[in-house]
Image: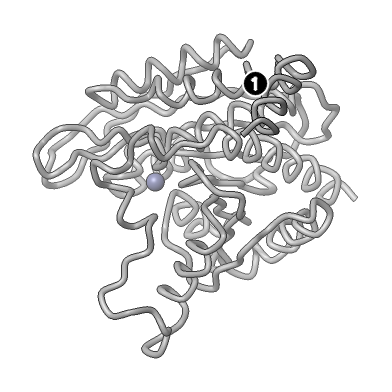
Amino acid sequence: MLFRSLAVVSALLVAPSVLAQDVDLKAQVAAYVQPSNEARTAVVVEQLRAAGFEPTVETFTGGTARSGPMEGRNVVVTIGDGPREILMTAHYDAVKLRDGTMAAGVVDNAASVVGMIEAAKILKTKTLTHRVRLILLDQEELGLIGARKWIEAHGLTNVAAVVNSDVAGYGDTLMYGQNNGDQSAGITRAVRELCAERAMNCVGYPVYPPSDDRAFSAAAAPVVSLGFQDHIGAHQMWLAFNGGQTNGLAEGFVPKVFATIHTANDNMDQIDPATVRMAGEVYAALVEKLDRQLTE
Ligand SMILES: [Zn+2]
């Protein structure tokens, strides 16, 4: 106990800015707890402006057969310049729960959005040969609609790589999907190099749950989908998706992450700002690595 409080005191003396940053990132994620996706759009725009960017809101007509036409809003910023682009994507919309209220949608996916904004802040200070476009997407939860509409509007001719993040609220283990086609093998390799260089826990999934990455891989773009969770949970999820009939998980067992997202449990109690900071650093480092490798 004493050691602990001493450690806290010395941490306060040595690194007040780090602690302040913790509080800040948690507050940044909490800001997305809103009664509508439209209100979440306003938070994205506000946070990007506060980070020194000039975001563009690209509206589209989305919605499903069930919902009817619904206006959607992708929020975009660009960093640097160059003939080829690296896209960074994360959806900011949340699902509506069965009782008709909005999920807080912080693990899925406000934490990724805040992580991506942190990554963009880091990348802004670097000299890159690619233009980096951060696209915070709407209507993922309705069926990857924001991503599809973005591709329809812009095409992918000059896109060298796409880095997507979905579910990154807690845990120290980076997850990456390996089911985005042969054109994505180079990005997967770069992720693995990064895991080794940073001596970071990583789990690759031959079968990985879909996110906006699928809209890009369907259009033949090189893409990886990333996320974070706890180490055990990451392995349980691996078994659930890749272990087949004899995966060894108890009958009826649901990995924590799936008992969390799209439920009332996806709330601020789950959010660890250390994960959000790590996500920002790792995503920035991956984009830097891809920028170098795709230039060589
Ligand atoms: Zn999601």
Judging depth in this view, the residue of 155 and 238 nearest the camera is 238
Image quadrant in which you'd find residue 17: top right
**Looking at the image, which residue sits at the far bottom?**
246
The answer to whether residue 278 is left or right of residue 208 is right
Q: Would you name the residue on which mark 1 appears?
A: 19
Residue shown at 27% from the left, 45% from the top = 142
| Residue 285 place in picture, x, y as percent | 76, 41
For label 1, count other residues whose C-alpha is less than 10 Å away and answer few (under 14), some (14-19) or many (20+).
Answer: few
Judging depth in this view, the residue of 225 and 8 nearest the camera is 8
Numbered circles on residues, count: 1
| Residue 34 place in picture, x, y as percent | 28, 22
- Relative height, residue 184 to residue 143 (above, below): below
- Relative height, residue 224 to residue 123 (above, below): below
Residue kind at label 1, given as amino acid type: Leu
**Looking at the image, which residue sits at the far right?**
296
Residue shown at 42% from the left, 58% from the top = 210
Image quadrant in which you'd find residue 67: top left
| Residue 151 place in picture, x, y as percent | 47, 42
The answer to whether residue 88 is left or right of residue 234 is right
Which quarter shows the N terminus? top right
The answer to whether residue 66 is left or right of residue 149 is left
Residue shown at 53% from the left, 39% from the top = 89
Q: How is the image coloured?
A: one colour
